[in-house]
Image (spheres, rainbow, N blue to C red):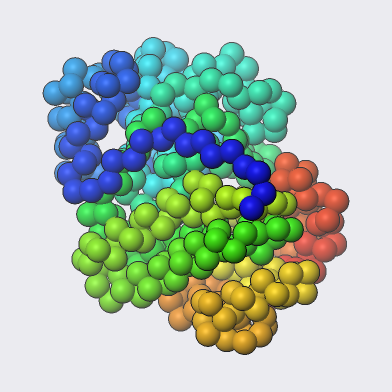
Amino acid sequence: MKDFTSFNPTRVEFGADKEKQIGGYIAESGVKKVLLVYGSDRIKTDGLFDSVATSLQNSGIEFIELGGVQSNPVLSKVNEGIALAKEQNVDGVLAVGGGSVLDSSKAIAAGALYDGDVWDFFTFSAPLTQALPIFDIMTLAASGSEMNPSAVVTNEVTKQKFYIYSPAVFPKVSVINPELQKSVSKEYLVYSAVDVIAHSIEGYFTAIYHPDLTASYVEANIKTVIKTTETLLKNPQDLDARGEFAWAATNALNGTTTFGAEGVVYPNHMIEHAISALHNVPHGAGLSVVIPAWMKWYYKNNEAQFERFAKEIFGKSSALEGIEALENWFNKVGSPTRFSQFDIQESDLDAIAQNAHMNSHFFGLNEVYSAEIIEDILTLAL
């Protein structure tokens, strides 16, 4: 294994009714007033909001609401949250929702302590060194944001979907109660599964050195996602499967899938960010289009690892058979694999490629992925 540093300060509270203890978890950090960030009003109709509010009140914690965070979170909502956090003098942020809510909350927590434009952090024009304490209750398993120092937001004016990365935005406490995720639609369950697989395979395929132990962990994570997704499509009430799915999602992007690896990069996410920035497609759905196309273009650069993937995940013998098997699984569970399923035409690909190439500078991939190469990859998904 190559040298690495493992640092993850997030405390995870996993299990039934843990959300009812959120007030106590926050109080332990000395926080007195939080901005409570969420997406739709569903958390009010299903009783979750009341449970959280009661817990906060019982612990003497005030809260200010900010609802309306959308999938593919946008900068305007982040700026709204920053203004509210400053106006109300909150000293913490509580996210109740999925990755979009938590990513917005991380950006708000950073912007609340910054006098400039929070977008400076996304363009790396200013260092992100401090943020308000962040807490979360996850109602969707996908992004892994509950145990990592990153967040992604779209600037709807510039059509840029960029990320921040700083230890300052590690959540203090993340609550994962699989029962809260039972109401996730089949559509978003599948998109979430694709996102988790994407997080797992980026380093697995792109690293110039990937330890066998870490690779074996990645394979176990992917097989767990495939198995539990199929179980949950048949029986959404299976809490054992939902719990394993949720924990696989967390571990796919908390560092454990790249321990000891060297040269890890994220080209699939780089390309997909351009797609969802321009066309607002669900992130996981965009990834299920990008991944097979990228794999077909890239596999000869690391054919032995692709062959290993084919054998370990699908019992196939060749790299191309493994790629086909993954694409077939995406189709089987109902995630798109062609641009036509989004009504994205060949004429749209140049703009996507140009946007992705702009983004490639922040991913450290601009010297490898020209706009022309990206368009070649995209063409494989027509």
- Image quarter hosting the C terminus: bottom right
Instruction: Please give the name of the residue rendered at 57% of the width and 81% of the height, measured from the top-left corner.
Output: 311
Residue situated in front as seen by the camera: 213 or 99: 213
What residue sits 77% from the left and 74% below the top?
300
Residue 116's x, y, as percent?
Answer: 62, 17
Percent x, y of residue 196: 48, 59
Residue at the spot x=42%, y=42% of the render?
146
Decide if residue 289 is on the left or right side of residue 230.
right
Q: Is residue 266 left or right of residue 99?
A: right
Q: Out of 339 and 365, give the one closest to the viewer.
A: 365
Residue 134's place in the image compared with 341, above or below, is above
Snapshot quadrant of residue 375: bottom right
Up-down relation of residue 117 to residue 138 (above or below): above
Residue 72: x and y in percent read 51, 48
Left/right placement of residue 182 relative to residue 190 reads left
Count of labels in the image: 0
Quarter of the image holding residue 92?
Answer: top left
**Viewer can see residue 28:** yes
Q: Evaluate whether residue 328 shows in this view.
A: no
Eyeballing the image, is 199 above or below 154? below
Q: Residue 379 in the image: state x and y as whole percent.
A: 75, 72
141 up-or-down from 35: above or below: below
Residue at 15%, 30% in the rendered image: 54
